[in-house]
Every structure is written in C-alpha cells, then in structure tokens.
C-alpha cells in the first residue's frame, strides 16, 4: 500500500512543471543564439500559463512599453467579439454603411453598402489599402475614416485579402459610434480584468478615434498576457470569461490568405504550420509577434526594432525559425497540453 501511494505521488510530480525544468536550459540556449538577430529586442515564452523564459537584448526589457504595431489588430478583433457578445454590435454580418453614413463619399460606390463587419475583420472589404505606400497619405489626411471609405474598390466585398489598416480603423470608429465610448475605454473595461494586461499608449486620428490596428503601445509582458487569454479560450487565470470561446475559434478560422506569405488569415489573426504545429499569430511591422501554439500550451511573444519591414528583410522568417526551435524543444520534452475545459 505504501509503495502504491509513493508511485501515485511520484506520478503526480511528473507533471509539465517537471518537464519545464528539463527544457528550460535548452530554451535559454536558444535565446542565447537569438541575440544574433540584430533587430530582435525581447522574447518571452509561456508554457501552460507559466513564464518559462524571457530575454531582453541590447538594453531592451520585457517590462518596458513598446509599439506592437499591427499586432494590435488582434486586440481590435477581441474588442469586436466582446462587443457582439454584449449586444453593442449585431454580428459579423452587420453592414457598416448605416453606422458610418456621415462619412460615406458623396458619390459612394454601391459596393460600400455591402461591406460587413466581418469583411473588415478578415481584410476582405474590397477597398484599396491604406497600408504600405499609401499609409503616409492616409495618416496625413484630415479624416482617416473618410479617407479609408473613399478608396477605390480593388475587389468586391468578401473577395481576396487586401491588407489595410484602414479596415481595422473603421472597426475602431464603429465601436466608438455604437458604444458611445472610446475604443481605449472599451479595452480598459473589457480587457482590464486580465492580470498583467495594460495599454500604455495609443494614438488617435484627427477626430479623436483611437487608431484601429496600429500605434498601440504595451509591454511585451502585457502582449504575452493577451496571447495567453486566447490560448485559454478567453478565460483569465482565475476563471473569469472575457472573450467568448466561439469568438476565438472563429477568429482563428482561416477565411482568406496572404498573397505574400500564403498564410491563412481569420479575424485579426494569421495561421501557419511551423515545425509541425498549427500556429496562430498576430504580426506587427518590424517583427512584433504574438504566437499561440494550442497543442503545446505555448504562448510566445517577440518584439523587434520597428524601424524596418520584417517581411522584406527576412527578419519575420528568422522569428518563425526561432519559434520553430522553441516548438521543437518543448515538443521533444513531451509536454503536449490536454485541451482545457471552458465554460
């Protein structure tokens, strides 16, 4: 009987926590080697809710706010999902033209009347992009919402992916119009109960609307907390639901794909297969990344110098490769997580 009890106790001790101790040295080695990536500033790794490694490079700290750039599109998506759950918005099929009627062009293309909230989330509005070479003209315009709505159509609503920060900015404007509150106030109210999550700074357009999908600052630790919220199906560590689980599932469902990378895109999240695992990630200019690897219970954040495009320099590919190394280390330790029950 005593022997059986000891076996049970030892089996309980052979938990992911023990496995984490076994792979921590390998993770530290990977982060040592990652210092060779010149733009890289921080890396944080959480396994089953426990931070197992974090590193700052060249004077940067995981506790210092930084711009997460377009990784904030994932935050906008979360706010839209919560708004639908609370009845502030009707759903992803809700038409945007009635909400933004005062900002529609005088000679509006009839297709504007067909754009839905879901089209904006998945970058399938059909409108020309305000990102890339058009970004400067957009942010220098007198009214960012009207500028985005005035872009000529390059496809029909629901067509191919046309990546545009203007689309997510329209979502910020819609949230503000429908709720009567600023998007920042909504974020602090709806996501504020998440321990460790805080928006340190967020720019606004000339009309005072917080920029949807860019120019948001938070610490890498805050971004990690946000990624963890998605990994756990919208539940905080103390079991409080902040995001509907079905919204997370819908957000991670690929509805289109990037013509540049081929990666799938849902509602503010990319999907890719990295090192044999399904990975969901938010991606910001320069290499601001929040990765979630559900099957391994992994959430990884990487932040980088915002001064250069990570796609053209190959830095994004380097970050994916680093994630692949992290995945390999954790997978080899045999720590795949069982699905978490949610309510």
Image: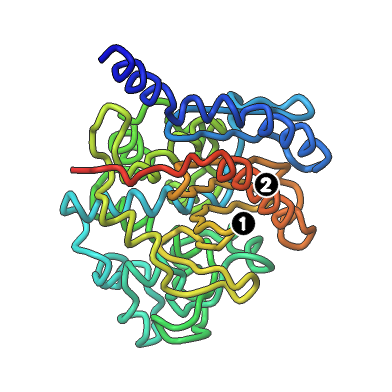
The tag on residue 325 is 2
Disc 2 crowd rating (10 Å Cα; few below 14, some 14-19, many 20+) is some
* Residue occupying the point 49% across, 84% down: 153
Question: Residues at badges 2 and 1 in contact (C-beta under 8 Å)?
Answer: yes
User: x, y (%) of residue 95?
Assistant: 26, 73
44 relative position to 193: left or right: right
User: x, y (%) of residue 172?
Assistant: 38, 54
Question: Mark 1 — residue?
Answer: 275
Q: Nearer the viewer, residue 144 or 167?
A: 167
Against 149, residue 31 (above or below) is: above
Disc 1 crowd rating (10 Å Cα; few below 14, some 14-19, many 20+) is some
Against 171, residue 261 (above or below) is: below
Image-quadrant location for residue 251: bottom left
* Residue occupying the point 53% across, 59% down: 142
140 relative position to 253: left or right: right
218 relative position to 86: left or right: right
Real-space Cα separation, disc 2 to disc 1, in angstroms: 8 Å
């Amino acid at each position: 009987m005593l022997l059986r009890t000891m076996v049970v106790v030892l089996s309980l001790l052979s938990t992911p926590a023990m496995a984490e101790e076994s792979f921590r040295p390998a993770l530290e080695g990977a982060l040592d080697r990652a210092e060779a990536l010149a733009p890289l500033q921080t890396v944080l790794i959480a396994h089953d809710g426990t931070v197992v490694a974090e590193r700052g490079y060249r004077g940067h700290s995981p506790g210092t706010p930084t711009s997460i750039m377009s990784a904030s599109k994932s935050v906008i998506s979360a706010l839209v999902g919560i708004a639908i759950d609370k009845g502030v918005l009707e759903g992803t099929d809700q038409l945007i033209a009635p909400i933004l009627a005062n900002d529609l062009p005088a000679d509006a293309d009839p297709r504007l009347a067909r754009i839905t909230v879901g089209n904006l989330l998945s970058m399938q509005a059909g409108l020309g992009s305000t990102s890339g070479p058009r970004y400067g003209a957009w942010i220098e315009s007198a009214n960012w919402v009207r500028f985005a709505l005035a872009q000529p159509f390059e496809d029909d609503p629901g067509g191919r992916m046309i990546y545009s920060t203007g689309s997510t900015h329209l979502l910020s404007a819609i949230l503000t119009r429908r709720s009567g509150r600023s998007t920042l106030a909504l974020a602090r109210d709806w996501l504020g109960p998440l321990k460790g999550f805080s928006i340190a700074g967020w720019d606004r357009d000339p009309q005072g609307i917080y920029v949807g999908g860019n120019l948001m600052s938070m610490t890498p630790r805050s971004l990690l907390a946000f990624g963890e919220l998605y990994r756990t199906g919208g539940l905080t560590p103390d079991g409080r639901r902040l995001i509907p689980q079905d919204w997370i599932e819908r957000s991670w469902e690929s509805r289109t794909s990037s013509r540049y990378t081929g990666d799938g895109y849902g509602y503010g999240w990319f999907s890719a297969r990295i090192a044999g695992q399904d990975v969901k990630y938010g991606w910001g200019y320069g290499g601001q990344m929040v990765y979630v690897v559900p099957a391994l219970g992994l959430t990884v954040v990487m932040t980088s110098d915002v001064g250069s495009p990570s796609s053209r320099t190959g830095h994004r590919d380097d970050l994916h490769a680093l994630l692949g190394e992290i995945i390999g280390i954790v997978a080899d330790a045999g720590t795949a997580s069982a699905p978490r029950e949610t309510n």
